[in-house]
Amino acid sequence: MPRPVPPPAATLLPGAADSPVLLHVPHSARGIPADVRAGIVLDDAALARELDHITDGHTDRIAAEAARRAARTPWRFVNRLSRLVVDPERFPDEREEMLAVGMGAVYTRTTHREVLRAADTDPEPLIARYFRPYAQAMADAVADRLAATGRAVVIDVHSYPTAPLPYELHGTGPRPPVCLGTDAFHTPPALLSAAREAFAGCGETGLDSPFSGTYVPLAYYGRDPRVSALMVEIRRDTYMKEPGGPPTPGLAGLAAALADLVDALPH
């Protein structure tokens, strides 16, 4: 079948033809188109601070280094725009619990619950322009892996701050060096076990705290068991200077652990 073509906001980086693994990196970028920036009420300094807090800094580099190290190169789907444009991991409707703090698919509030966009902002233009094409491209990438290998494994690569931010709805629980987010339908025990083993050398590995769940394109969500998924949330102090600073030497070890997870998955 033809290779999926991602929207301009994302890049699909090919891996081995027989690899079912798709590393998804949705929150690593800081780019905001000028016309989208015009709808954000923060001044430039405040916006830069918000990007420091909300961006999963250097997770694209972790995924790239893991892909380079892996014995069989995984595919990578990398968002090239900030999640302040749209957040591709949110539900685009009332199912999204983060709507309670103004952080649905189109954010109207910041990490500190301050105004980001006017409360009456219509999210539909941004959803139509960015969210739906992104979602379709991810669904196409998963379909491509299913056609090529009979299965797809989405590894969702994220990071989170050492200290909870005011927007977090579940910020009072454990904040281990590595949090594994799971889904009852799409995260099989073997995938979770492989991740625990791969990241064992990175410190404590927790489960679904402070963040839970994992990304599966809605076309497959809860429907197709051939699509498995796991979210890897890395605490930022383990690999970068917070907030928004450069990477530290810990990044290499985390990338190696992610590569070990890729290599542990059956092909």
Image (cartoon, rainbow, N blue to C red):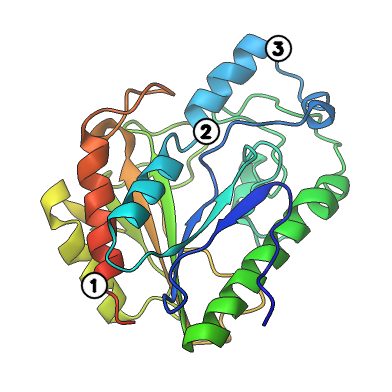
- Badge 2 crowding class, 10 Å Cα cut-off, few under 14, some 14 to 19, many 20 or more, is many
CB atoms at circles 2 and 1 under 8 Å apart?
A: no
Query: What separation in Å lies between label 2 and label 1 (alpha carbons)?
Result: 31 Å
Residue 162 position, x and y percent, is 31, 33
Question: Which comes before the other along the chain, label 2 or label 1?
Answer: 2
Residue 258 position, x and y percent, is 28, 56
Query: What separation in Å lies between label 2 and label 3 (alpha carbons)?
Result: 16 Å
Residue 25 horizontal side relative to residue 253, left or right? right
Q: Is residue 114 above or below residue 106?
A: above
Task: Determine the secondary structure under disc 3.
Answer: loop
Question: Which comes before the other along the chain, label 2 or label 3?
Answer: 3
Numbered disc in front, either 3 or 1? 1
In this rendering, does residue 42 appear at all?
yes
- Between 30 and 73, the residue placed more toward the observer is 73
| Disc ID at residue 43 | 3
Q: Amino acid at mark 2?
A: Ile
Query: Residue beneath label 2, please?
Result: 54
Task: Determine the secondary structure under disc 1.
Answer: helix
In this rendering, does residue 176 appear at all?
no
Question: Which comes before the other along the chain, label 3 or label 1?
Answer: 3
- At 26% from the left edge and 69% from the top edge, which residue is drawn? 263
Quadrant including the C terminus:
bottom left
| Disc ID at residue 207 | none
Q: Amino acid at mark 3?
A: Asp
Query: What separation in Å lies between label 3 and label 1 (alpha carbons)?
Result: 46 Å
- At 70% from the left edge and 45% from the top edge, which residue is drawn? 86
CB atoms at circles 3 and 1 under 8 Å apart?
A: no
- Between 139 and 83, the residue placed more toward the observer is 139
Q: Quadrant of residue 50?
A: top right
Q: Amino acid at mark 1?
A: Ala
Residue 48 horizontal side relative to residue 34, left or right? left
Query: Residue beneath label 1, please?
Result: 264
